[in-house]
Amino acid sequence: MEGQEGIQEPHLALAHKLFLLTHPDVQDIDKVRLREEVLDSVKADDMAPLYENLAASSVLEMDPVILESMRAKIDEELKKLDEKIADAEENLGESEVREAHLAKSLFYIRISDKEKALEQLKVTESKTVAVGQKMDLVFYTLQLGFFYMDFDLISKSIDKAKNLFEEGGDWERKNRLKVYEGLFCMSTRNFKKAADLFLDSISTFTTYELFPYDTFIFYTVLTSIISLDRVSLKQKVVDAPEILTVIGKIPNLTEFMNSLYDCQYKSFFLAFAGLTEQIKLDRYLHPHFRYYMREVRTVVYSQFLESYKSVTMEAMATAFGVTVDFIDLELSRFIAAGKLHCKIDKVAGVLETNRPDAKNALYQATIKQGDFLLNRIQKLSRVIDL
């Protein structure tokens, strides 16, 4: 499962196709093509366990002949691998024994037998001494975790990798881990940490087994826009040469980034509308689509209002290329949710900002937390008195 430069790991490419197969926005004609591609991949790698699961969930049709053929090939290959392990244990050295066990681990990963793959990876780890080789086993486990979107497995594997790095480990693997952790953070809606990890990895990206460099830049820009302030965005993203060399290949992303920074809000909304389909059809971002839409709008509305003490709703609607009613409805939701610090004077048709400064905000938060703590202490004292 090691990714070569520029080549995505086939299992993760297959996982994306499976995601699209169950997506309601993908057209039926595309699903027919995707179904054929998935079946070809399943047959090519003898993924009998996955085939059974897909047939049970009606993604693919069950063909007993195909299933039996795959099982026969799996049994034959396992027999060869077990013979190789036995031979290595009897006649060869420790490194050959480890290699034989690793081959069996990779075979279980290839046929998509998750439980046996994890068991065999543990056996292989017990035969492994070098920290670098142990790290490679963790990367195999992480890829398995992303294939099944098993966040518990991913989280434990990342923690394990960090502990291994305390024993040693090279920079190349450390940089690769940052991308894995960034993808995990993005998939679990921790966009701020994801942006920091992705930005740290821009100049050292080698994790092609997860996704191509274009996709990495796509994720980096999207997470940065809702996480960084204007100054940091300019330094780390807008002017970053690594991003500028690739960003033009991704539709609407250049306009999305530059129009936000240049305060061209009408262009920003048009570019954002073009990007929504890509976000919706992305396996890792899709669960957070509505959340991301809200966060981006919060950023852009806050940036616009930052320049004004008060502004007419008509002027704001014109700047964004939308109607006054739309702006009224949008802002009222964000104000009620505490995302925007302003109030709407409906009679005058004016927005008045009331941004609290950082010191006041900290003061209010301290008072609120202090009241909460006092209430808890009072409740506790009543229990103790009883």
Image (cartoon, rainbow, N blue to C red):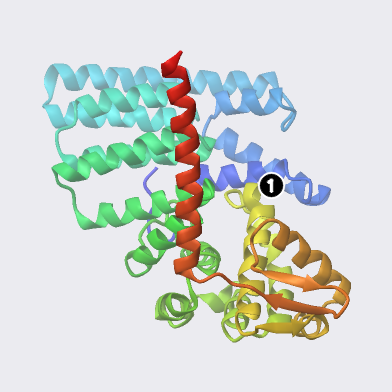
Give, as a three-letter code, the residue at label 1: Leu
Along the line of sight, which residue is nearer the eye, 371 or 100? 371
Percent x, y of residue 364:
51, 58
Percent x, y of residue 292:
63, 58
Along the line of sight, which residue is nearer the eye, 7 or 371? 371
Which residue: 76% across, 80% down? 320
Q: Is residue 121 above or below residue 226?
A: above
In this picture, residue 165 sits left or right of residue 274:
left
Q: Is residue 338 above or below residue 56?
A: below
Which residue: 14% across, 16% down? 90
Percent x, y of residue 278:
66, 61
Q: The residue tagged with tag 1: helix, strand or loop?
A: helix
Which residue: 80% across, 85% down? 318
In this picture, residue 274 sits left or right of residue 7:
right
* Among the 4 quarters of the image, the one containing residue 201: bottom left
Residue tagged by mark 1?
20
Q: Which residue lies most toward the front here?
A: 385
Which image quadrant: the N terminus? top left
Q: Is residue 198 visible?
A: yes
Along the line of sight, which residue is nearer the eye, 291 or 85? 291
Percent x, y of residue 381:
43, 24
